[in-house]
């Protein structure tokens, strides 16, 4: 048991030593991140090039120009001079978009049928940019490191003190940590990106009330189900939370 305790202290000390404490923009939530900004942006650049190499990038169309123009307006208020912003429209039926570390934004054509005007498209782009500004990817990587580290420590402790329960621990920890920690953590990040995105939209001069209409478009004809087994909040929860953010901004 002494060795196990020493291992726990060593791992915790290592995490604290290499971790970087920071705060998210607008929400001011404290974070502990173990990945440097340079490492994160290098990973983003690599993933971005891979994504574009495997996709059909649309250029010089009205929609492609809309994506770039709207994205550039939001980038101007994002206050990230170290980001090398790029905005691309990709032909893909998925209703999706993403922003990689360093400001690499990709919008899929499939989402355009839900984003019915520039303000609603700004909702999408600002939400994805918010993920990058808040360093959600690096934070998820760091949380995964902690999750794996705690699981390893638990195995050492159980293996030393009660090896007959080691398999049961592994099964319970794997399910419990995923449902109890990682999935709610993903929902929290999505809600936070919604909130930060609304602030970015507002500063860039877009109509923030259109954000509610966009999410209503996304949920039309779909069953939301429960939040518990999802990394994303359901549309009703999302719209309600976004409305609260809009109300606060409108009362300033």
Image: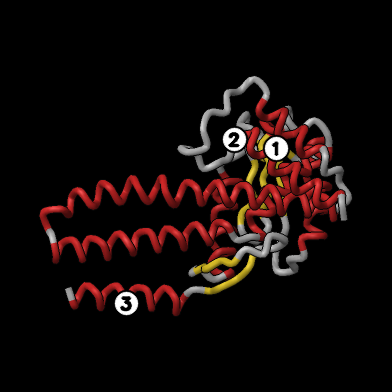
Location of residue 209 by image quarter: top right
| Nearer to me, 246 or 112 | 246
Q: Position of residue 9 (x, y in %)?
A: 32, 77
Vertical relation: 76 (above or below) 59: below
Compute the Cα span from label 3 to label 1. 43 Å
The disc, 2 or 3, on the residue closer to the chain's N-terminal end is: 3
Percent from the top left, x then y, of residue 101? 61, 59
Q: Which residue is mark 3?
A: 9
Q: Secondary structure at mark 3?
A: helix
- State the mark number for residue 234: 2
The relative height of residue 135 versus residue 94 in the rendered view (above or below) is below
Q: Are marks 3 and 1 in contact (CB under 8 Å)?
A: no
Classed neighbour count for the residue bearing mark 1: other residues with Cα under 10 Å, few (<14), some (14–19), many (≥20)? some
Q: Is residue 93 left or right of residue 5?
A: right
Q: CA distance from mark 2 to mark 3?
A: 39 Å
Q: For the residue labelled by badge 2, is the local secondary structure a helix, a strand or a loop?
A: loop
Q: Position of residue 36 (x, y in %)?
A: 54, 71
Q: Residue at x 50, y 57 (%)?
A: 140
Q: Residues within 10 Å of mark 3 (few under 14, many from 20)?
A: few
Q: Which mark is residue 239?
A: 1
Asked whether 134 or 236 is in front, the reply is 236
> If you read the primary sequence from the N terminus, does the residue marked by circle 1 or circle 2 appear first?
2
- State the count of labels: 3
Residue 174 appears in view? yes
Q: Quadrant of residue 149?
A: bottom left
Q: Label 1's element? A: helix
């Amino acid at each position: 048991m002494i060795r196990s305790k020493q291992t726990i202290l060593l791992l915790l000390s290592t995490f604290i030593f290499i971790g970087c404490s920071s705060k998210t923009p607008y929400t001011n939530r404290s974070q502990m991140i173990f990945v440097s900004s340079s490492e994160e942006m290098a990973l983003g650049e690599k993933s971005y090039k891979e994504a574009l190499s495997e996709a059909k990038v649309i250029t010089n169309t009205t929609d492609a120009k809309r994506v770039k123009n709207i994205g550039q307006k939001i980038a101007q208020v994002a206050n990230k001079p170290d980001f090398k912003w790029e905005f691309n429209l990709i032909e893909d039926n998925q209703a999706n978009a993403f922003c990689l570390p360093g400001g690499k934004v990709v919008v899929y054509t499939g989402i355009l049928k839900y984003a019915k005007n520039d303000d609603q498209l700004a909702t999408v782009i600002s939400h994805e940019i918010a993920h990058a500004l808040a360093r959600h990817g690096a934070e998820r990587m760091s949380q995964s490191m902690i999750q794996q580290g705690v699981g390893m420590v638990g195995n050492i402790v159980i293996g030393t003190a009660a090896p007959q329960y080691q398999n049961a621990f592994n099964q319970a920890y794997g399910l419990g940590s995923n449902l109890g920690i990682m999935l709610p953590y993903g929902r929290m990040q999505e809600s936070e990106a919604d909130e930060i995105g609304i602030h970015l939209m507002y500063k860039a001069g877009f109509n923030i009330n259109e954000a509610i209409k966009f999410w209503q478009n996304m949920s039309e004809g779909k069953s939301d189900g429960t939040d518990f087994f999802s990394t994303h909040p359901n549309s009703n929860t999302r719209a309600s939370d976004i409305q609260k953010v809009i109300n606060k901004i409108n009362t300033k």
